[in-house]
Image (cartoon, rainbow, N blue to C red):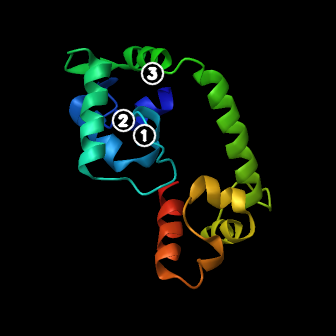
Amino acid sequence: LPRVFRAIDADGDGWVSRFDFVTAAVQDAVVAAAVLPGECLAGHVPRRDDVTFDAAHEAFDSLSDGRRRVSLDDFVEHFRRRTPGANKEHAAAADESKAVFDLIAADARGTVSKLAFINALQRHPQVGNLLLPGEDGCRLWSDPRSFEAAKATFDAI
């Protein structure tokens, strides 16, 4: 949560305003996945649509409780209260993410090239299911739309 807060706090002043919050939620898929209810956008192109915009405003209203801005402590307390059991879910998600990363980064250098990412999407269905749901990894080299979706996902990550 502190990392998400820092991503939202663009000017680094230790406070998040409605503008900071909404802007980050519609522009950063990782932030959206962390702060918007029902959103599961990690690794996907940010969505700038009415639903995401409205959800971001409602989430800030809930978080701020009428205040114009919130601190890191307020932010962490709110999202920990909102998601009971989040630590267990977070640990499970972290384990799954690590397993997927290990499939992508077979050379264990700690970095992932775009080519390695696309190859992992083709070879390992669990990578595609987590990071590019709804796309057929086998079609990445033959379908320009699928290839662009994979590229956008890589860039977002």
Give the answer, above or below, for where 107 lies relative to 22.
below
Q: Position of residue 19 (x, y in %)?
A: 22, 35
Pick whichever of labels 1 and 3 is earlier in the sequence: 1
Q: Toward the viewer: 80 or 134?
A: 134
Asked if the residues shown at circle 3 and circle 2 are in contact, with their CB atoms under 8 angstroms apart, the answer is: no
Count the marks.
Answer: 3
Secondary element type, mark 2: helix
CA gap between label 1 and label 3 equals 13 Å
Q: Toward the viewer: 53 or 108?
A: 53
Q: Position of residue 118 (x, y in %)?
A: 63, 70
Give the answer, above or below, for where 55 lies relative to 142.
above
Asked if the residues shown at circle 2 and circle 1 are in contact, with their CB atoms under 8 angstroms apart, the answer is: yes
Label 3 Cα crowd, 10 Å radius (few <14 / some 14-19 / many 20+): some
Pick whichever of labels 3 and 2 is earlier in the sequence: 2
Amino acid tagged 1: Val
CA gap between label 3 and label 2 equals 14 Å
- Mark whose residue sits in front, 3 or 2: 3
Q: Toward the viewer: 109 or 75?
A: 75
The residue identified by callout 3 is: 79
Amino acid tagged 3: Phe
Q: Position of residue 21 (x, y in %)?
A: 30, 34
Secondary element type, mark 3: helix
CA gap between label 2 and label 1 equals 7 Å
- Residue at the image position 68 percent from the left and 68 percent from the top: 116
- Residue at the image position 27 percent from the left and 18 percent from the top: 64
The residue identified by callout 2 is: 8
The residue identified by callout 1 is: 31
Labelled disc at residue 10:
none
